[in-house]
Image (cartoon, rainbow, N blue to C red):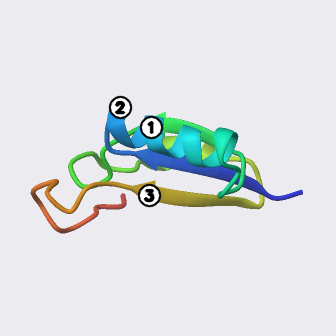
Amino acid sequence: MEYFQYYVEGEDEEKLVNVLKSDMQCIEAGKVQVLNPVLEKITPLRLRTLKKNTTVILVFDTDAGESEITFV
């Protein structure tokens, strides 16, 4: 079984992803969490909580400031 984890920048992106996956059924169902991937590090602890075969999708605005995403 494949799982999907959406990390979104803020509340607006969270609402957008929820509408796209639930109401419009345009994207795969999955868990949505607010985490700004441009400003916050994606730590090994966070990665360990993901189930095997999880696809991680990062959703953020291009005006988010920094242009580098940091993985620990």
Residue positioned most to the right: 1
Image quarter (top left, top right, bottom left or bottom right) of the C terminus? bottom left
Residue under circle 1? Answer: 14
- Pointer 2 with pointer 1, Cβ within 8 A: yes
Q: CA distance from mark 1 to mark 3?
A: 11 Å
In the image, 46: left or right of 42? Answer: right
Q: Amino acid at mark 3?
A: Leu
Name the one closer to the observer, 62 or 7. Answer: 62
In the rendered image, the vertical position of residue 45 relative to residue 72, given as above or below: above
Residue beneath the point at 74% across and 48% down: 51
Residue positioned most to the top: 11
Residue under circle 3? Answer: 58
Image quarter (top left, top right, bottom left or bottom right) of the N terminus? bottom right
Residue under circle 2? Answer: 11
Residue beneath the point at 28% across and 61% down: 70
Q: Secondary structure at mark 3?
A: strand
Residue 58, horizontal then vertical, whole percent: 44, 57
Q: Secondary structure at mark 2?
A: helix
Q: Secondary structure at mark 1?
A: helix
Residue 3, horizontal then vertical, whole percent: 75, 53
Q: Amino acid at mark 2?
A: Glu
Q: Amino acid at mark 1?
A: Glu
Say which quarter of the image contains residue 27.
Answer: bottom right
